[in-house]
């Protein structure tokens, strides 16, 4: 009952998260406004004959005020229309210096349609056999590394349905495998349609296509504690076998469901990548080394189950996952004096890399403070069940912790999360081994 009441009091508005957007700001055009994507449909074409790729997008969005809409897309749009009329798209700069795209036309409150085309060239490799390897790899520790690398997208605060229509042109029948966490349907001998759930954010979708049979694949099912049958796909490259991934997946699923409740995604897809490179989570999917599989699966609960609204909230899920990696430690005080993990610019999108070490220390401290009422895991289980498939902020996390425990945690958050950057030994905290920086060549090898 307590969690039911709490979800009413502190819940975010399901799938309507414009109140979580960064502040609008002034540009030379006028006021740049953040908008609410309602639906985005992407027509992705791989021309395997001419080795060219392009995307045609149609985005329905709502504006709640008058202004010039912003979104993001790193490849420059070739052409664009707003409500059926040609329009230009410019690159603009937020108050913190970060880059994003702005529509060079003012809109009023209401529903609008933005259409555009862009070239697709990142993480694509064509073969002489008229096949293609392509993936929408993402990263959360670096700026502008979500879907905006490939297709026009909104920011992490927003949840919206995404549809991808994938066509392999220049050939009558595609010889491709597609791995995805969306609902996949073949619509013609060389075309596919992927429908992603409405609760997905810009870092949720998983998409990887390879020449047919290139990867070793194993499909099986897992019976959730809820009774639901979960379809699972694990796949690896030539040097490994997916059987060990199957066994580890089943083991970790059993652990996570016991700790936090039933798996909250329609399926699970895991791709084993290079040893020692760590991994990256998606919603019910991951590309990961074997050693990082359990860490990335935990992120389907915290990161892609309960999802951060921005870079200032990303520390939460990395802290939880790293706390688990270290055996759910309990400490009377964190092993650092203070830090700023969640008080950066409101326009920041990437997670502070110190969240792994410092965030895990803070979670161990919270576990100590909550030990008389079941500890932090008891809170996290209820928090996940109350807010799965929603977007949260650090303030939301703190408010719920205080509601659950009856404690005033203001000083703790102002010291360890919103404080000054210093530690007890003034040491530098490196990125966790499960999120090692991966270079361009390694990303190409993963294709």
Image (cartoon, rainbow, N blue to C red):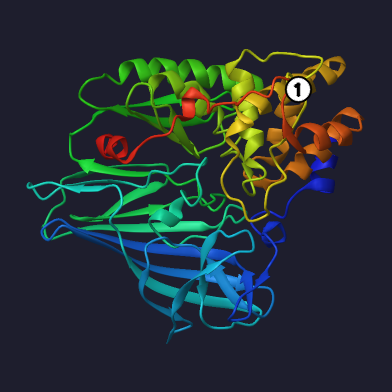
Label 1 packing within 10 angstroms: few (<14), some (14-19), many (20+): many
**Is there any visible trace of residue 1 in the rendered image?**
no
Frontmost residue, 370 versus 444: 444
Q: Which residue is mark 1?
A: 376
Residue 153, given in percent of the width and then of the height, sits at 48, 60
Which x, y percent locates residue 306? 64, 39
On the image, which quarter does residue 339 sit in? top right
Give the residue at the far front of this rendering.
426
Could you tell whether 133 is left or right of 351 in the image?
left
Q: Residue at x 55, y 32 (%)?
A: 299
Q: Is residue 153 left or right of residue 412?
A: left
Image coordinates of residue 80 in percent, x first then y, are 40, 77
Q: Quadrant of the C terminus?
A: top left
Quadrant where the N terminus sits is: top right
Farthest residue, direction bottom: 85
> Does the image show residue 300?
yes
**Is residue 3 rendered to the left or right of residue 109?**
right
Disc 1 on helix, strand or loop?
Answer: helix
Q: Horizontal placement of 410 versus 360: left or right? A: right
Q: Residue furthest left?
A: 128
Residue at horizontal 41%, vertical 26%?
221
């Amino acid at each position: 009952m307590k969690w039911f009441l709490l979800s009413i009091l502190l819940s975010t508005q399901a799938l309507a998260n414009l109140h979580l957007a960064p502040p609008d700001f002034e540009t030379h055009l006028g006021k740049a406004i953040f908008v609410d994507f309602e639906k985005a449909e992407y027509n992705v074409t791989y021309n395997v004959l001419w080795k060219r790729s392009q995307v045609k997008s149609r985005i329905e969005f709502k504006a709640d005020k008058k202004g010039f809409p912003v979104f993001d897309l790193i490849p420059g749009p070739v052409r664009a229309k707003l409500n059926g009329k040609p329009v230009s798209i410019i690159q603009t700069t937020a108050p913190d210096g970060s880059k994003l795209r702005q529509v060079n036309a003012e809109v009023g409150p209401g529903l609008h349609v933005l259409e555009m085309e862009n070239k697709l060239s990142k993480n694509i490799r064509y073969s002489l056999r008229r096949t293609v390897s392509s993936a929408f790899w993402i990263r959360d520790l670096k700026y502008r590394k979500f879907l905006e690398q490939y297709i026009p997208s909104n920011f992490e605060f927003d949840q919206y349905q995404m549809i991808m229509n994938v066509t392999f042109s220049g050939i009558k029948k595609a010889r491709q495998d597609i791995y995805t966490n969306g609902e996949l349907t073949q619509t013609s001998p060389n075309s596919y349609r992927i429908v992603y759930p409405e609760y997905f954010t810009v870092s949720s979708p998983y998409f990887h296509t390879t020449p047919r049979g290139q990867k070793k694949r194993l499909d099986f099912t897992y019976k959730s504690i809820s009774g639901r049958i979960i379809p699972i796909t694990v796949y690896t490259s030539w040097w490994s076998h997916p059987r060990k991934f199957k066994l580890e997946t089943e083991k970790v699923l059993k652990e996570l469901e016991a700790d936090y409740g039933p798996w909250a995604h329609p399926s699970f897809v895991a791709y084993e990548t290079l040893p020692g490179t760590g991994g990256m989570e998606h919603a019910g999917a991951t590309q990961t080394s074997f050693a990082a599989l359990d860490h990335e699966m935990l992120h389907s609960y915290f990161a892609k189950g309960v999802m951060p609204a921005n870079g200032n909230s990303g520390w939460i899920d990395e802290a939880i996952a790293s706390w688990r990696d270290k055996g759910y430690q309990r400490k009377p005080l964190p092993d650092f004096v203070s830090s700023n993990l969640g008080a950066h610019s409101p326009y920041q999108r990437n997670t502070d890399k110190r969240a792994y070490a410092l965030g895990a220390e803070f979670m161990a401290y919270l576990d100590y403070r909550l030990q008389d009422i079941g500890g932090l895991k008891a809170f996290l289980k209820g928090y996940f069940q109350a807010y799965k498939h929603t977007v949260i902020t650090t303030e939301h996390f703190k408010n719920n912790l205080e509601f659950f425990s009856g404690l005033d945690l203001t000083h703790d958050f102002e010291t360890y999360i919103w404080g000054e950057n210093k530690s007890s030994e003034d040491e530098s905290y490196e990125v966790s081994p499960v999120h090692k920086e991966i270079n361009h060549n390694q990303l190409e090898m993963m294709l």
